Image (spheres, grey):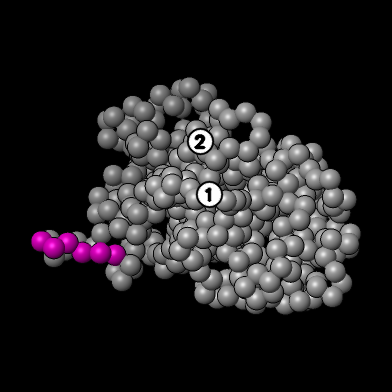
Amino acid sequence: MKLWEKDFEINAEIERFTVGRDRELDLYLAPYDVLGSMAHITMLESIGLIGKDELPVLLKELKAIYEQAVKGEFVIEEGIEDVHSQVELMLTRKLGDMGKKIHSGRSRNDQVLVDLKLFTRHQLKLVAEAVNDLFAQLQQKSEQYKDVLMPGYTHLQVAMPSSFGLWFGAHAESLADDMQFLLAAYRTANRNPLGSAAGYGSSFPLNRQMTTDLLGFDSMDYNVVYAQMCRGKMETGVAFAMASIAGTLSKLAFDACLFNSQNFGFVRLPKECTTGSSIMPHKKNPDVFELIRAKSNKLQALPQQVTLIKNNLPTGYFRDLQIIKEVFLPAFDELLDCLRMTAYIISRIEVNEHILDDPRYDPMFSVEEVNRLAAAGMPFRDAYKKVGLDIEAGRFTPCKDIHHTHEGSIGNLCNDRIAKLMADTLAEFGFDSVEAAEQRLLAI
């Protein structure tokens, strides 16, 4: 079944090529396609295009299809082009001509747009929750080990005193910034394109505000041409937000791999979270963080992939946009997997609390000594030279009792303020109102 078929059959190879992976990828969209249809036909009934007696019958069948989709039982049959065709086919099998009425006033163009936006909105909620879970683990570790010093590095050279409080907390604050990108992406996803049809509106007196409210969108994409133009643009913005999170994960994973190695020995992964070697019995490899690093680096290419597919398209719909689904839809599963695995490992990671017993790290206290001499009255440049000469001559004895008090330093992590940044951003998403709208729609 094809929603556009007439009195001729398309070449089988052309069909195979043009359908591509839609039957597989549209399974991601199935529950959202049904929600969009429920809102659309509720609106159609309000303007007289569906009978009052027909609406409850159609809604009942759509709810049954929705339950199948949520349970993973929804299937796009062989020969059926996409999720939209499958849903309409299931309705017409049960309800006859009544099922054919649901497409009035819309196109597959705005239908897939609303599917993508509803799907993306839900996935961003899951990502935001997973980011917040990892954030909480990092903050907990930051507080737990705030007094345990470790070397800080510049140019991969031992530089100045740092702490595990700073190290864990730095990655937590990075996630708080990532959440701002996620919020911006969510706001663009949470706008209703339904009613734009093929990108030029409809002669039917559609009530777009009604479908906006029914689906819990913040607002609509008002201009019908722009509603179509935002396909690809929305995915690009979301991809950049996901790439920002992936960048944080990649850096954390690299640090963990480095610090877990024998030459550093700053942290230790639980042995049950490592893998072994087929030839070296002593090995406990940090494969989990290596894979998180690789997957995160792959995710950082997502914005470029989406951009390169859409960047030379003029105004209007083109089939090129279908290919964006191939890289975009599965990316959420990969990011969520990385976030959840990172949180799991961080909650179990062990810290070496005696790193500074090793004298190789003594020079990292040189700045502390320079500052002590400067505070006692010696000109800073003279103090710098004296300490440098003492180190060269082997006369430097570090004082490891340090006191940093300014905001964000070893002795004043400001974790409570960072937590407030994260909480304030999370509160702006408005997930509760979206969930309430979807539940009301399903209860009609």
Judged left or right of residue 149, residue 406 is right
Asked whether residue 440 is drawn in magenta, I would say no
Q: Which residue is the site of mark 1?
A: 8
Q: Earlier in the sequence, mark 1 or mark 2?
A: 1
Residue 427 appears in the rendering: no
Residue at (61, 55) in percent of width and height: 3
Pick the quarter of the image with the C terminus: bottom right
Judged left or right of residue 168, residue 439 is right
Where residue 6 appears, as percent x and y from the top left, is 60, 51
**Badge number at residue 309:** 2
Work out whether 333 lies above or below 244: below
Residue at (46, 22) in percent of width and height: 382
| Figure label count | 2
Cα–Cα span, label 1 and label 2: 31 Å
Which one is in front, 171 or 182?
182
Where residue 337 appears, as percent x and y from the top left, is 46, 61
Residue at (34, 59) in percent of width and height: 288
Pick the quarter of the image with the N terminus: bottom right
Which one is in front, 438 or 3?
3
Q: Amino acid at mark 2?
A: Ile
The crowd level at tag 1 (other Cα within 10 Å; few <14, some 14-19, many 20+) is: few
Secondary structure of residue under mark 2: helix
Secondary structure of residue under mark 1: loop
Which one is in front, 61 or 28?
61
Rendering quarter of residue 101:
bottom right
Q: Residue furthest left?
A: 279
Q: Which residues are magenta?
A: 274-279
